[in-house]
Amino acid sequence: MSKLGRIGVYPGSFDPVTNGHLDIIKRASRLFDKLIVGVLNNNFKNPIFTMEERVALIGKCIMELPNVEVKMFNGLLVDFVKDNGASTIVKGLRAVSDYEYELQMAMLNKHIDNDIETIFLMSDIQNSFLSSSIVKELAKHGGDIKGLVPDEVVDDITSMMQQRFKMQEET
Ligand code: PNS
């Protein structure tokens, strides 16, 4: 398969990583010599998981993928892309509802730097309903998140969520 460029960047909040993310990571890793998973640090979305936790969870899932690396970033995505010698941003699209926001982001990033391309991979149909938010919602209420997040991190995410919400109930 021909390569889209030497290095690709797959950015996101990953709060936490899901099977949908991992599917995109695996598929994108075949398109580039190296894929960098960029985890946004200064996130207005108020993540539940700390930066270190989000990076560590992804790290556990990519052990078998030698050309994938996880890094945190601050500030503009296009700067992170350039600083890492990349020129392609990879995003996943689940449904038409993702399209409008993602199109806006892709246009904005192209406006900031015309040399940077965004490519979209369609989510696998079985992940089309999946999001970090529904994983958190389910785990928060004691639901089983197996099958929604990578097997390697089911227990970690479950216990992190239990800790957080038990602590909140106690305070
Ligand atoms: O998983 P998410 O939360 O949808 O990821 C969003 C992300 C991290 C890709 C996006 O918020 C982002 O690129 N943030 C960095 C700041 C930036 O460059 N914004 C666009 C131009 S203002």
Image (cartoon, rainbow, N blue to C red):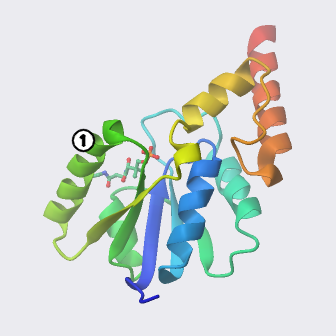
Q: Quadrant of residue 87?
A: bottom left
Q: Quadrant of the C terminus?
A: top right
**Mark 1 crowdedness (10 Å alpha carbons): few <14, some 14-19, many ≥20:** few
The residue that appears at 50% across and 42% down in the rendered structure is 128
Q: Is residue 168 above or below residue 134?
A: above
Amino acid type, callout 1 = Glu
Q: Does the Cβ of the disc 1 residue fall within 8 Å of ligand 1?
A: no
In the foreground, 84 or 96: 96
Q: Position of residue 95 (x, y in %)?
A: 38, 41
Q: Position of residue 84 (x, y in %)?
A: 43, 78
Residue linked to disc 1: 100
The residue that appears at 67% across and 58% down in the rendered structure is 58
Residue 71 seen: no
Q: Position of residue 167 (x, y in %)?
A: 79, 19
Q: Quadrant of residue 70?
A: bottom right
Is residue 1 toward the left or the right of residue 152 in the image?
Answer: left
Q: Position of residue 27 (x, y in %)?
A: 54, 69
- The local secondary structure at tag 1 comes to helix
The tally of labels here is 1
